[in-house]
Amino acid sequence: MMEKEKPRKGDGSTLSMILVITASWLLILGETYVFFVIVRPLGPPIHEALLPSSILKVALTALLGLLWVAVMFGIWWLYLRAHRTPT
Amino acid sequence: MLPGAGDVIPLALALVIPAAAVFLLMPRYIGFLYRKGKTTNDAHKGGDVRVPTPAGPLLIFAIALGELAVWAFYGSVVPLVLIVVVLCAGLIGLYDDLRGLGGVVKPALLALVGLFVVLVEQYYPNVYDPTLYFPLFTRTGTHFIIFGLIVIASIPVASNAFNMLDAFNGELAGFTAIVTGALVIGILMRSFDLGDTSAATVAIALPLLAVSLAFYYYNRYPSRIFDGDSGSLALGAMFVILSIVGGVEIAALVALIPAVLNSYYILSSVRGLVERKKMAARPTSLGKDGKLYASTEARAPTTLARMILLTGALDERSLVRRILTLTAYAAFLSVVTSIMTWLL
């Protein structure tokens, strides 16, 4: 019977990082959908008319950026917590 | 439109001239740096292993040669803009190599390089298209001011992301070659779909690909030369301007995810813009077995390498191979993004 092959060192972290990159990419795609389908039709561009809806568009766009940052921060925190690294 | 038969010679020259310049001049340049005593300790080898640095000036020279060849064939102003961008970013890096620049001064100076590109666009409106094209859905309107701000901000962000990734033998050269490959594919797809970019746009991207591949030969483990900040900032600035003039910004962003995450996690862990040389602790340490270990110090920055090493020590070559595997995966996602943007 063949001996069970041991996983190589670092393979686990490579897979974890691939998942982090995939999550980051999917988040970019998801936020693109939210931007074009929900945020963009809310009102005219802010340089054409300074309406509350235009300001809301800018605020929601900034919020999407912050969401990406927050999710990436969350993933980082979970990754380090899983490996019990002091920060 | 896609490159035709008449573009074969300029495209070939855009690849061959910069690569030949690196291969022909690098051995002499390495000897020159040794004679001048311009060497630094390779921190990830045991003992005092001296490696010449910086290769940046030669890389910039090789890229400029390639861009001049493209300019001679197509007469576009874009290769000349790229030469100025690479030269300015390289000079900022060279000053940082020799004298050192603060964590805030360096990005501010790099932002001025972005401002130069925006100003050129005012006089030559075909340098870039101030519109962002997103995968699957649609594109934004034409926004000169917002897009100009993105151009100005993107150079310091991307250049510093390249700089922060430049820690191990062959890491940055391999990274640049892989992500530039994805960028060239994206530009080709845009040419196929819109027809507003030409063979010249593809040609201006090739010198970066050629130089990074040729430099990888000298920079891979064990490194015979380091690029220094002059090299990393110049390569980063060139990459970001290529993505802008090529109109493939989102695909470029996806390819850069490993570098963006690396920078983001460093900045989050050290809480601010801190110059690498002034960081309180190193993210990795060299063990007596010659392997690299993740630092256990709380004040050490969290880099991509440190995160990979958390599951076990690796030798430098294996660690760089892991990082380049992640880069190749991000480049694959970038190509998928380009397909979703231009072909679906």
Image (cartoon, rainbow, N blue to C red):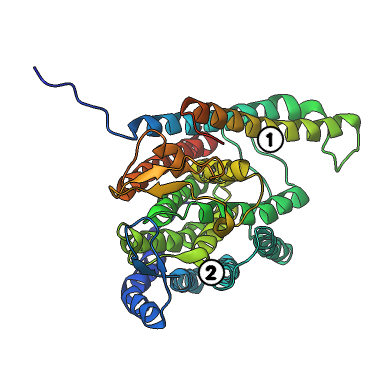
Image location (x, y in percent) of residue B71:
51, 71
Q: Residue at x 54, y 61 (%)?
A: B233
Element at badge 1? helix
Packing grade of label 2 (10 A; few <14, some 14-19, many >=20) is some
Image location (x, y in percent) of residue B344:
51, 32
Q: Residue at x 43, y 70 (%)?
A: B53
Mark 1–mark 2 distance (CA, rounded to whole Å)? 33 Å
Q: Nearer the viewer, residue B195 or B134?
A: B134
- Disc 2: which chain? B
Q: Is residue B153 above or below residue B225?
A: above
Q: Is residue B153 above or below residue B123?
A: above
Instruction: Identify residue for label 1.
Output: A65
- Disc 1: which chain? A
Q: Is residue B21 above or below residue B8?
A: below
Q: Nearer the viewer, residue A50 or B230?
A: B230
Quarter of the image where one finds residue B167: bottom left
Image location (x, y in percent) of residue B274:
63, 54
Image location (x, y in percent) of residue A57:
80, 32
Element at badge 2? helix
Q: Is residue B39 above or below residue A43?
A: below
Q: Is residue B185 left or right of residue B271?
A: left
Q: Are marks 1 and 2 on the same chain?
A: no
Amino acid type, callout 1: Gly
Picture disc at residue B78: none
Q: Residue at x 61, y 45 (%)?
A: B270
Residue B8 appears in the figure: no
Instruction: Identify residue for label 2.
Output: B97
Q: Nearer the viewer, residue B234 or B185?
A: B234
